Image: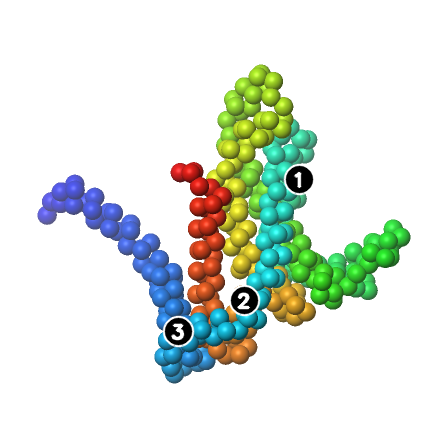
Amino acid sequence: MNISYKTQKYIILFGFLTIPVALLCAFSLYPAAALFYFSLTDWDGLGYDQTWIGFANYKEILMRPEIFGAFKNNLYYFGGGVLQTAIALYFAIVLNGRLRGKYVFRVLLFLPYVLHSVATVIMFKNLYHAEYGSLNVFLGAIGLESWQQLWLGNPHLVNFSLAFISMWKYFGLSMVIFLGALQSIPKDLYEASTIDGASSWQSFRFITLPSLRRVIELMLILTLTGALEAFDIPFIMMLGANGTSTFVIQTVDMAFKFENFGLASAMAVVLLFIVLFFIFIQRKVLFRGDH
């Protein structure tokens, strides 16, 4: 049986699209729909005994200020992420230039991102330990005993300490993303600006920054979503104790500690809409007019 070229094309397209669409439905759309359904039930996560309660879980979230209060701890990670992005851009510009040994520095700065979060936390536990931690020992050795702190025991410092760990771990990823974007900028633009007498700052302001506009937008989105979804470092290091609980930690505790999967699902749905809302605002306000 002869099949026309047009029919063959549609068969091939259908064959290539079937598997991705099936995977998307199985691992994204169906779990999202199931999550929303569970958020409308009273369920302990065991068996099929699910009681339909409508939007009662969402009302409970609004009536419990301690749930949304956890977002104040997420602000530490957002602030640290913005600072990390700025520093990563600076290092990317430096390591994109004619610096001897720049490839070695690139590898060294990217290595923390490769480390597993558990290994990172163990390392910083030894650094922050109040008695034999490397940081306090170093401060004592150089005569700055007054600067020694309970880095994980002081409620006013612990979130700064955890946010710094997150900055250190993900700094390399931000730098590599900026490096890739910088290397895509045509060298002719910089050569022309040099001939016209532009300074390094003017080249950065009028060539580099506009060329990195989309990448900066991406980094801000990653910073925002990463801050709202902060979980691994504060959970492994502190288990949410001493005022370090984030919204995701509270969601996990609600599901597995208090066995209230319905309320935990509602919290996850709320977090999803919060992330989408802030991304929408970010694109409309910070990058309006950019198509």
Judge the density around disc 2: few (<14), some (14-19), many (≥20) Cα neighbours within 10 Å.
some
Res. 154 image quadrant: bottom right
The numbered mark at residue 105 is 1
Check the image and name the residue furthest to the left. 1
> Depth check: 177 or 160 in front?
160
Q: Is residue 127 left or right of residue 108?
A: right
Residue drawn at x 68%, y 57% is: 160
Look at the image and tell me in which quarter the C terminus lies: top left
Q: Is residue 43 left or right of residue 226?
A: left
Amino acid found under the numbered disc labelled 2: Phe
The numbered mark at residue 55 is 3
Res. 208 image quadrant: top right
Q: Position of residue 134 (x, y in %)?
A: 79, 57
| Closer mark to the observer between disc 2 and disc 1 | 2
- Is residue 169 among what the camera can see? no
Residue behind mark 2? 68
Q: Is residue 184 above or below residue 66?
A: above
| Closer mark to the observer between disc 3 and disc 1 | 3
Amino acid found under the numbered disc labelled 3: Phe
Q: Is residue 80 left or right of residue 143?
A: left
> First in sequence: mark 2 or mark 1?
2
> Depth check: 284 or 227 in front?
284
Judge the density around disc 1: few (<14), some (14-19), many (≥20) Cα neighbours within 10 Å.
some
* Element type at mark 1: helix
Amino acid found under the numbered disc labelled 1: Phe
* Element type at mark 2: helix
Judge the density around disc 3: few (<14), some (14-19), many (≥20) Cα neighbours within 10 Å.
few
Q: Position of residue 163 (x, y in %)?
A: 65, 56
